[in-house]
Amino acid sequence: MPETLQTERLTLRPYEIGDAPAVSNQIGNYSVCQWLTRVPYPYGEADAFEFFGRTTGDSFVKAVVFRGDLIGCVSIMGSDLGYWFGETYWGRGFATEAARALLARFFDAGNGLVSSGYLKGNTASRNVLQKLGFKHTEIVPTFTKSRNSDVPTHRMELTKTCWENRV
C-alpha cells in the first residue's frame, strides 16, 4: 500500500474515490489546466476517476492535503516530476514543499535522475523547479490537451548527486 508522507504543513497521500469532486473542480479551472500537458479541458469527475484508476498503487502519485482539504497533486511518473495546485493555493510555497518531500522519498528509494519542465510563460513553475535544484536541459515543443496545440516546454533535470549536495 502506498505510504502517506507528512511535511510541516501538508499531507501527501494516495487518492481516494471521494477526491474526484475536489480534483475536477480545481484542475477543471482553465487557469490551472492550461499549464499542464496531459489534462483535457474541460475536465470532469470522469477524468479524475480515469486518473485514479491509472495510478492506483503508484507510490509516487500523491494527493496533497492542507488542513483537511485536497489542494493539488504531486507525482513522479516514470522519472518525470509533475504537480498542480488549485488556483486559490498558488503563491504559498505548497508546490515546493510537496515536491521536496516526494523527491526526498524518490531519491531515498535509490533513483538517480528526475526530469520535469514548465510551459513557456509559467514563471511560477520555473521558480519551483529552480528552488528544488533542477537545471535547464532544452526547449521542446509539447502538445497540451487543454490548449489543443504545441507549446514550448523548458525541460529540466535533477540528479541524485545535485539533490544530495544542495544547500
Image: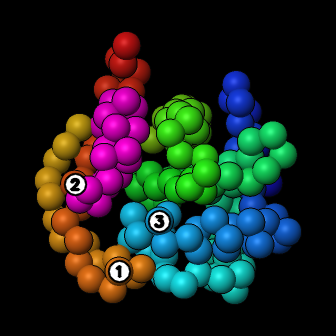
The vertical placement of 127 against 78, above or below, is: above
The vertical placement of 123 against 16, above or below, is: above
Question: Quadrant of the rendered structure where residue 132 is?
Answer: top left
Residue at image coords 16%, 47%? 137
Give the Cα distance between marks 1 and 3.
Answer: 11 Å
Q: Relative to residue 1, is residue 146 drawn left or right?
A: left
Tell me the number on the disc at residue 31.
3
Tell me the number on the disc at residue 77.
none
Q: Residues within 10 Å of mark 1 (few under 14, many from 20)?
A: some
The vertical placement of 107 against 13, above or below, is: above
The part of the chain drawn in magenta is: 114-134
46 part of magenta stretch: no
The vertical placement of 152 against 147, above or below, is: above
Residue 9 pos. (x, y %): 71, 30
Residue at image coords 35%, 17%? 165
Q: Can residue 73 be seen in the rendering of this structure?
A: no
Please state which of the two labelled residues, at mark 1 or mark 2, is closer to the viewer: 1
The kind of secondary structure element at disc 3 is helix
Q: Amino acid at mark 3?
A: Ser
Tell me the number on the disc at residue 154.
2
Residue 139 pos. (x, y %): 15, 58
Q: Amino acid at mark 2?
A: His
Q: Earlier in the sequence, mark 1 or mark 2?
A: 1
Q: Which residue is mark 1?
A: 147
